[in-house]
Structure formats: structure tokens, C-alpha cells
Image (cartoon, coloured by chain):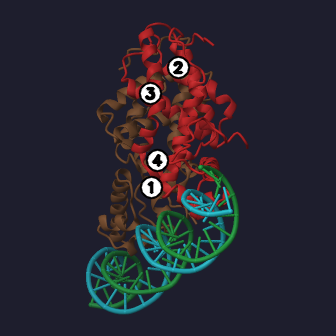
Chain colours: A brown, B red, C green, D cyan
DNA sequence: GCTAACCCGTACACCGATGTTCGAGTTATC
DNA sequence: GATAACTCGAACATCGGTGTACGGGTTAGC
């Protein structure tokens, strides 16, 4: 199973190369859009819910996404791609201090995560952690690059495994999403909060106090 | 596998005050113990699994825990209580530097979380975040106390909401548990890693560089 | 404007899991 | 040793959700 869906934010072609009809394409798009909305915000979502909310027959839904897992996989993939897109919209200058870049990256990731806050929980429970992690790879790579550059610059610490540092960042971003979801945190305040928490955790202790007048 | 005999929190009496029979008590204990083991490690667990694994009839299981949610609730409660117990085993001296105390607290919490790593995912999915959070309150209080003391001492920063700082700590601890679960992190290395990550994030930037390795 | 692709609703088979009921056997406790 | 508490197995009712089959209607695309 798990026929690999090809890439591209809008797959104009099917797996076998034959082009899809326009209305099918449109349905897929609205399914994904409303699916993200539903799974991203609500707690209990069934395939029937998605179909109804997308204004589409349940059968049609299954025609495009043979199983619930397939749909969820596609949704996560789409969310990740959105995040990639937001991140890449602001190209990173290699000479720029990595902590600054990381700050921007955090804000960008947050923007997408802020919508779709509950998607992660669903995916975690129904797809398993491994697959979810694998889908996060593209973002993880970008993060890894920033961290590595920061280490070369002497801005970030080198006494911890890079993998762990990255995981810690993910963890904090997701925690912020949960807090926002429960209303304990104002979404607008999150980017600054994240910066203020993450940067000191990654900062190289010997160079300088991490407080640094960022911005 | 002995040592299932836990703290005195074992309810010797029923809700209405009438004492329970000894064999019932024993069954409840083993149900909770094996339940923790199963939900803490495996991915898909049914009530039947728990009953069988506990060497108990499914009906008996339902006699003590009327619903799956009830069982999960009890399991979480028990895990939390174990954590409280481990934390309280080492009383905190108010004059002691708070970062040191926090380090110990992290290690203590980790010890319990290391077993039962997957319990959180189950509880999150089936009990909801609100109830899970509420069950974490006892630990959250202890953490809050340490943070507050650290702020008074000038060791911890005061420029962030205390709630968020505490949430961040929780988040990192749970992230470590997930990493250990997936084998990417050696459990033995976790306490040091946590200390090294959490403390700089909470440290007061103006007093001194957090690198000062106390121990 | 013809054809094939696509959509729709209904209906059904299936599945696994949760709870419940019963009557009869065990076992603690006073 | 009598009573009430507890346990057991197996069967049953239920439920919600997933996935499939059919037949007729609609629409895009060449």
C-alpha cells in the first residue's frame, strides 16, 4: 500500500501519468483544504464528516483517497509543503547570523502550525510517530542546515547532539501550538516567545549572553 | 517484576467507604501494573488485552473500571503519583540554588516517564488534552514552585510567563521520552541532556552565563 | 456532440471493540 | 461455616466506522 503520491503542491497528473479531469482535480483540492481545516481544528473526524463538509460524496472521497490513512498522509504532506513554501519564501543569506535566520524560520513554521494545530495529534495516533517524523524530514533538513551554519559561526553550541537540538526545537514549537489551541497563549505572542526560549537553549555559552538584542 | 507494590496511595477503601476484599484489591493492583506496562509500551491495546495479560476475566476488569476511559484515567493518575513520589523523596532545601533543584526534578520525572513512554500518546488521544493537563497539575505545581524560587533567587529569568516556561519544560521532557522510545536517544544520556537544554532556556540572562556547570 | 471520465446516493457487508447479562463457581471475612 | 463479596466464561447486543458494489446522472474534453 502507500502508493507514493508524486510531489508538487497540485498534482496535475495521476500516478501513472494520465492527466486528471479538471473537476476531479478541483474536488481533490477542496477535500484537502477542508480536510486540513477539520483535522486541524476538531477532535473527532470521520471520513463521512470530511466528505460532507467538502460537499462531496463519500464514495468520491474514497475514490481519491482509498483509505483514511491515505487521506491523513496526504494532509500532513500538504501541511509540510505549505511550511516549506513559507520558509523558502525568505531565502537565507549564508553570511547572516544563524540565530537571526532561526528566528525567522520559527516564525514561518509557526504560521502554518497555527492553523492545523490538532492535525499533529491525529497523525500521531493514526499514522504512528515514525511515519510522521519521516514526513517532517524536509523541514528537519532546513533546520539542520541552519543549526550547522550557526555552529560554524560559533553562535550555537556544539556540546549537544545536533539531532537532539533540532528535536527540542520541534518540541517547543508544537508545545506552543498546543498552548495556543487551549487558549492559554495568544497566537500573536508566540513567535517572540519561541525565539526567546529556543535561542538561549541553542546558544553557545562561551561566546556571549544569548539575550542579544535580536531584531 | 515484583515491586508493583507502590506508594500508600493504593485505595484500601471504596468510594463509599466500605472496605474492599483483599483479592479484589490485589486484582486492581495487577490490572494497573500490567495496564501501565501495556499502554506504556505498546501501540494498540484493547481491554481484552489488558484483562488477558493481567490474568483476569474481562468481566472482572469492567467490574473495577467501568469504561476504557476510566482505566486510562486511573493509569495516568497512578503514573503521576509515582512521579510525585519520586520527586518528593528528595526534599528541596529552600536555600539551595533552584537550577540544581530543577536538575534533580528533571531526572526524577524522567525516571518514571522512561517507563510508560507511550502512555501519554494514548491518554492524549482518548482522554483529550484538557483532562491530561489537569492530571499533571500536581507535578506542575511542584515545578512552578521551583521556578518561582529560582526567579526570587535571580537564577531564572522573569521576562517570560511562568506558565510558558513550565510548559516548555514539560514539552522537552516528553520530547526526550519520544526520542528514547524511537531509539534515537540512549535513556541513560537523557538526564544530562535535559539539564543542558532546559537550564539555559530558563536562565536569567543578566546574572551570568548559564555555562557555569554546577553539579 | 460523443465518449469516457467522473460524480452521486443508497445500500450492504464487515470489522473490531466496547459494554452487559447470566448463572454458577470461589474465596475472603466475620 | 455461613454470608456476602468477588470471579469467571461465554454469549449477546450494540455501535461507529471503514470499505465496496451498483446504477443512473453529470460534466469535461477532443
- Mark 1 vs mark 2: give the one in front: 2
Alpha carbon of mark 1 to alpha carbon of mark 2: how far? 42 Å
Label 2 and label 3 in one chain: yes
Q: Is residue B215 above or below residue C5?
A: above
Question: In front here: B161 or C7?
Answer: B161
Residue B18 is situated, as x and y percent measured from the top left of the image, at 50, 48
- Mark 3 vs mark 1: give the one in front: 3
Closer to the chain start, of discs 2 and 3, is: 3
Query: Which secondary structure lies at badge 2?
Result: helix
Q: Are marks 3 and 4 in contact (CB under 8 Å)?
A: no
Q: Is residue A147 above or below residue B6?
A: above
Alpha carbon of mark 3 to alpha carbon of mark 4: how far? 26 Å
Question: In front here: B196 or B173?
Answer: B173
Image quarter of residue B181 = top right
The residue at which mark 1 appears reads as A8
Label 4 and label 2 in one chain: yes
**Pointer 1: residues within 10 angstroms few (<14), some, or many (20+)?**
few
Label 3 and label 4 in one chain: yes
**Residue A215 shows in this picture:** yes
Residue A5 is situated, as x and y percent measured from the top left of the image, at 51, 61
The chain that hosts pointer 1 is A
With A201 as the anchor, is A21 left or right in this view? left
Residue B189 image label: none
Residue drawn at (37%, 37%) of the image:
A179
Residue B141 image label: 3
- Mark 4 vs mark 1: give the one in front: 4
The residue at which mark 4 appears reads as B15
With A36 as the anchor, is D21 left or right in this view? right
The residue at which mark 2 appears reads as B199
Closer to the chain start, of discs 4 and 2, is: 4
Alpha carbon of mark 4 to alpha carbon of mark 1: how far? 59 Å
Amino acid at each position: 500500500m502507500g502508493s507514493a503520491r508524486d510531489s508538487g503542491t497540485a498534482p496535475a497528473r495521476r500516478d501513472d501519468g494520465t492527466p486528471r479531469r479538471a473537476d476531479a482535480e478541483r474536488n481533490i483540492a477542496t477535500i484537502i483544504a477542508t480536510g486540513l481545516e477539520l483535522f486541524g481544528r476538531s477532535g473527532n473526524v470521520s471520513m463521512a464528516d470530511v466528505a460532507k463538509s467538502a460537499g462531496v460524496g463519500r464514495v468520491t472521497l474514497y475514490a481519491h483517497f482509498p483509505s483514511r490513512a491515505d487521506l491523513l498522509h496526504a494532509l500532513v504532506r500538504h501541511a509540510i509543503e505549505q511550511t516549506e513554501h513559507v520558509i523558502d519564501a525568505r531565502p537565507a543569506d549564508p553570511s547572516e547570523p544563524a540565530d537571526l535566520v532561526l528566528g525567522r524560520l520559527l516564525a514561518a513554521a509557526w504560521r502554518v502550525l497555527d492553523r492545523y494545530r490538532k492535525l499533529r495529534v491525529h497523525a500521531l495516533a493514526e499514522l504512528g510517530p515514525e511515519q510522521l517524523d519521516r514526513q517532517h524530514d524536509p523541514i528537519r533538513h532546513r533546520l539542520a542546515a541552519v543549526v550547522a551554519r550557526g555552529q560554524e559561526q560559533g553562535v550555537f553550541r556544539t556540546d549537544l547532539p545536533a539531532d537532539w537540538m533540532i528535536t527540542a526545537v520541534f518540541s517547543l514549537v508544537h508545545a506552543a501550538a498546543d498552548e495556543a489551541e487551549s487558549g492559554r497563549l495568544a497566537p500573536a505572542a508566540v513567535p517572540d516567545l519561541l525565539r526567546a526560549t529556543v535561542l538561549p537553549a541553542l546558544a553557545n555559552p562561551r561566546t556571549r549572553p544569548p539575550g542579544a538584542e535580536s531584531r
